[in-house]
Image: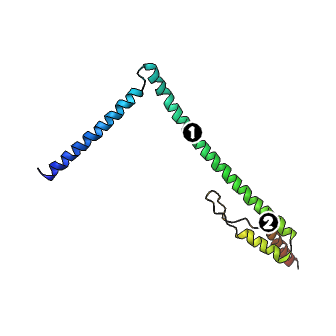
């Protein structure tokens, strides 16, 4: 007997074992399935509807939670920017600069938020505009 014949015999034996397992699964499944026309019709109609509703509900909820998380993250970043604006406008000198430096250095490490740093202070932009206007007027 050649090695090719031995390989084919091994494959036939393995195929017989797989076929026997599938036959056992088919017999078990057949014993649980309905035998009447009414029961089979219900499964044919209801099973696709349940699967479709489950998939649509999952996709909708996943997208909804993603949107809500992004909006809440953007709200937190806006709150941080508001605290930055209020605190710097109320403080003077080096303390305000240190506070702004701390807030600007804070980076978002979450995978949902698209912002990488806290937004720049609007007060700083106003000061730069006022400074440039005063130098132009002089």
**Disc 1 target residue:** 56
* Position in image of residue 94 (x %, y %): 82, 77
Judge from the rendering whether residue 126 lies leftward or rightward of residue 51; answer left or right.
right
Find residue 135 and report its horizontal and vertical position in percent.
85, 78
Considering every residue shown, the one lying at the far left of the view is 1
Dot 1 lies on which element?
Answer: helix
- On the picture, is 38 further left or further right than 14? right
Q: Callout 2: helix, strand or loop? A: helix
Q: Give the number of the disc on residue 11.
A: none
Q: Give the quadrant of residue 22.
A: top left
Identify the colour scheme used: rainbow
The residue that disc 2 covers is 84
Which is nearer the eye, 132 or 53? 53
Residue 66 rendering spot, x and y as whole percentages? 63, 50
User: Crowdedness of circle 1 by 10 Å Cα count: few (<14), some, many (20+)?
Assistant: few
Q: Viewer-proximal residue, 53 or 25?
A: 25
**Residue 47 left/right relative to 129:** left
- Picture quadrant of residue 126: bottom right
Q: Earlier in the sequence, mark 2 or mark 1?
A: 1
- Residue at image position (78%, 74%) is 98
Can you say which quadrant of the picture contains the C terminus? bottom right
> Residue at 26% across / 42% down in the picture?
15
At x 12%, y 51%, the residue is: 2
Using residue 130 as the reference point, say whether residue 43 is left or right of it.
Answer: left
Q: CA distance from mark 2 to mark 1?
A: 42 Å
Q: Is residue 72 above or below residue 41?
A: below
């Amino acid at each position: 007997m050649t090695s090719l014949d031995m390989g084919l015999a091994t494959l036939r034996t393995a195929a017989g074992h797989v076929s026997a397992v599938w036959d056992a699964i088919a017999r078990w499944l057949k014993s649980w399935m309905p035998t009447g026309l009414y029961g089979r019709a219900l499964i044919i109609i209801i099973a696709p509807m349940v699967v479709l509703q489950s998939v649509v509900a999952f996709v909708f909820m996943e997208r909804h939670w993603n949107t809500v998380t992004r909006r809440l993250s953007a709200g937190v970043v806006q709150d941080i920017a508001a605290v930055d604006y209020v605190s710097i406008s109320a403080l003077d000198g080096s303390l305000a600069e240190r506070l702004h430096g701390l807030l600007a250095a804070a980076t978002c490490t979450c995978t949902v938020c698209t912002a990488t740093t806290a937004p720049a202070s609007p007060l700083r932009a106003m000061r730069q505009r006022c400074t440039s206007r005063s130098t132009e007027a002089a």
